[in-house]
Image (tube, rainbow, N blue to C red):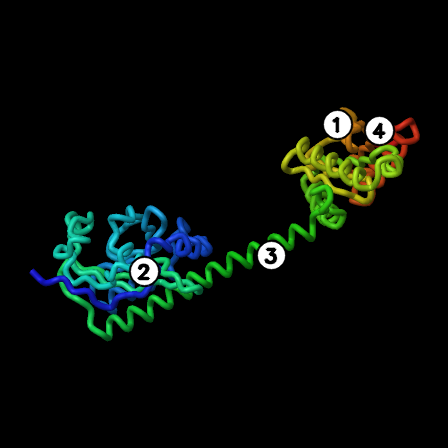
Amino acid sequence: MLAVEKVHTLHIARPQADQFRLAALHRYHILDTPACEDFSFLTELATKVCEVPYAFISLVDADRVWIKSCSGMQMGELPRGESYCSLAVLGDAATEIPDLSADPRTAHMTLTVGEPHMRMYSSVALTSSDGHAIGTLCVMDTKPGRLSDDQRATLAKLARQVMALIELRSNERNLEAAVRELELLATTDELTGLHNRRSLLHRLKFEVARSRRFRAPLSALMIDIDHFKKINDEYGHVVGDHVLANVGRLLRENVRVIDMPSRYGGEELCVILPNTPVEGACKLAETLRAKIEAQLHAAGARQFRITASIGVGSFNHMEIDDAEGLLKQADDALYRAKRAGRNRVECGSD
């Protein structure tokens, strides 16, 4: 039986610093991601270069070793205590073991005593940009042995490619998240959390085109908080902002996912209602009006209620067949509601 050899050791974080290593790993958001051909190509190349049947890209998490890619066998993850890679990553001088069955640290492990009875293990650490070993690119064989110097040098180059690919995927995800955040900022009213006017008008064009094509019903609500100037004058603009935010939250909680509640301007709000005829829109408008009237608002120790007037417009494919006409009909109905005494709903045209 071959003597245990400890070669090519890594100067990496000890277990007491594992929290920092784990933080580095988790920043990449790579754990439990789907299989990827780019990573598979690198493990397949590693088997060919090293002339062994097995290669793995392994990432060492808190309690498990998750396999991003493997060649030669199918494996998703292992307990950390059953993985050769955890020894290498946690600084136990185990980056190459010529005979796993002869090493007391690995002789009992599942892949050693069970199929496929691994014997040779060689790995190169995957090192994060801040110097933490988050995993390994490793190769294995069922026969004892070790890699040549050229093979280890090439394996190290492949490991750098694996890490570059991990960095690239992480940067792509971060960029996508930043773009989504910018899109959200560009389409959302910061105070109410509703869509802003620009987003509303953009979506309305789409809904009008869809309604025309499929002859589908389409309605809109124009909502105005009654005597909003008096609220600002009596309680202050901060309280007025809280009122708008509360009403915005109420709208979000009481419309469907396909509906689009928006801040149209000032204290005026708008809700686009796809696939909704005028009868359904008027019913929803009355429900919202009643909920707004019942909602309590606070100004210090004082509490007060507000009311709202709502106008309903509906796409009828005859008199009203464009976005401007729909909003005008809803706005005209809103004006009638305010003229009739406020805190009421008016539907459609005169």
Callout 3 environment at 10 Å: few (<14), some (14 to 19), or many (20+)? few
Residue sitting at x 89%, y 38%: 233
210 and 232: which is toward the camera: 232
Q: Secondary structure at mark 2?
A: strand
Spatial CA span between label 2 and label 3:
32 Å
User: Which mark's residue is nearer the viewer, 2 or 3?
Assistant: 2
| Sooner in the amino-acid sequence: mark 2 or mark 4 | 2
Q: Is residue 315 left or right of 58 when viewed as pictured? A: right
Q: Secondary structure at mark 1?
A: loop
Spatial CA span between label 3 and label 1:
36 Å
Using the rendered image of the protein, determine whether residue 266 is visible from the camera's viewpoint. Answer: yes
Residue sitting at x 88%, y 30%: 337
| Sooner in the amino-acid sequence: mark 1 or mark 4 | 1
Q: Which mark is residue 346?
A: 4
| Sooner in the amino-acid sequence: mark 1 or mark 2 | 2
The residue to which callout 2 is attached is: 136
User: Which mark's residue is nearer the viewer, 3 or 1?
Assistant: 1
Spatial CA span between label 1 and label 4:
21 Å
The residue to which callout 1 is attached is: 295
Q: Position of residue 249 (x, y in %)?
A: 69, 36
47 and 16: which is toward the camera: 16
Q: Position of residue 86 (x, y in %)?
A: 29, 54
Amino acid of disc 4: Glu
| Sooner in the amino-acid sequence: mark 2 or mark 3 | 2
> The C terminus is located in which quarter?
top right
Residue sitting at x 64%, y 38%: 258
Using the rendered image of the protein, determine whether residue 315 is visible from the camera's viewpoint. Answer: no
Q: Secondary structure at mark 4?
A: strand
| Sooner in the amino-acid sequence: mark 4 or mark 3 | 3
> The N terminus is located in which quarter?
bottom left
Callout 4 environment at 10 Å: few (<14), some (14 to 19), or many (20+)? many
Amino acid of disc 2: Thr
